[in-house]
Image (cartoon, helix red, strand yellow):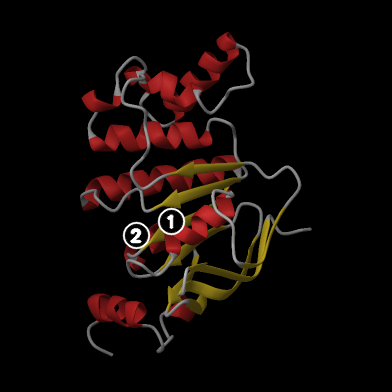
Amino acid sequence: MSALLAIRDLAKRHGAHTVFEGVNFSLAPGERRAVLGASGAGKSTLLRLIAGLDAPNAGTIERAPGLRIGMVFQDLALWPNLTALENVTLALPDLPRAERRATAQAALDSCHVGELTNRRPGTLSIGQQQRVALARAIVAQPSLLLLDEPFSSLDLALKAELLAEVRAQSEARSTAVILVTHDPCEARALCPAALVLEDARIIASGPWDTLATHRGSRLLAAWRSAENGPG
């Protein structure tokens, strides 16, 4: 399989409620793609299926052989009783202790929080916590990085800084990225293309110039109105 990830006719239901169905898309190595949708559209559910944390009711997810996945959760999921370094080393269970610590330290350094090695999450700012969570996600050199709205609570300046950091890390490591968000502006800052989940299906997909002309999405209509005025 030349694609890093290929999703075919994916469906997920919770009881009688259909979260989404008929989801199809693929992701190439190094590609960055956003998944846009309002709250409750199924974005996080889709990410959990890709990560293997949940199972679909129908369809398939084909992963390239040897695919390694890193994930930054919406709530970051840092262990409060562990230091920044210890949180990152959790992603390296199979390495000898000394190598595990050195590799984790290098990941913290690359995310510009290397000086916070011995600090616990509760003593860090939200931006610093975000960087520690990113370091943990990239430390094992994943070929696919999943981002579940980790930047939604940040102010605009810090959000822009961290999105630029993720983009730099992706480009430096040729890491593919899937960003889940409800904010097209945030998505556009990181990803050259996006797909839109609305009404339990993908209603639009493609690069931003294509999405800008799409007339069937409430979310994209609101984005166009905010950026360009009603139209």
Question: 88 or 23: which is nearer to us?
Answer: 23
- The kind of residue tagged 1 is Leu
- The kind of residue tagged 2 is Glu
Position of residue 35 measured from the top left corner of the image (x, y, whole percent): 46, 64
Position of residue 33 measured from the top left corner of the image (x, y, whole percent): 52, 61
Name, please, the residue furthest toward the top: 98
Give SS at disc 2.
Answer: helix
In screen coordinates, is 35 left or right of 117? right
Q: Residue at x 50, y 49 (%)?
A: 146
Q: Are marks 1 and 2 in contact (CB under 8 Å)?
A: yes
Looking at the picture, does residue 147 appear above or below residue 105?
below
Q: Residue at x 52, y 36 (%)?
A: 138
Looking at the picture, does residue 137 appear above or below residue 107?
below
- Residue named by callout 2: 186
Give SS at disc 1.
Answer: helix
Position of residue 46 measured from the top left corner of the image (x, y, whole percent): 51, 61
Question: 73 or 163: which is nearer to us?
Answer: 73
Q: Residue at x 54, y 46 (%)?
A: 171
Tell me the tag on residue 138: none
Position of residue 109 measured from the top left corner of the image (x, y, whole percent): 43, 24
The 10 Å Cα crowd at callout 1, few under 14, some 14 to 19, many 20 or more, is many
Name, please, the residue furthest toward the front: 15
Question: 178 or 57: which is nearer to us?
Answer: 57
Q: Residue at x 28, y 90 (%)?
A: 231
In screen coordinates, is 57 left or right of 123? right
- Residue named by callout 1: 190
Q: Is residue 208 visible?
A: no
Which of the 4 image quadrants contains residue 72?
top left
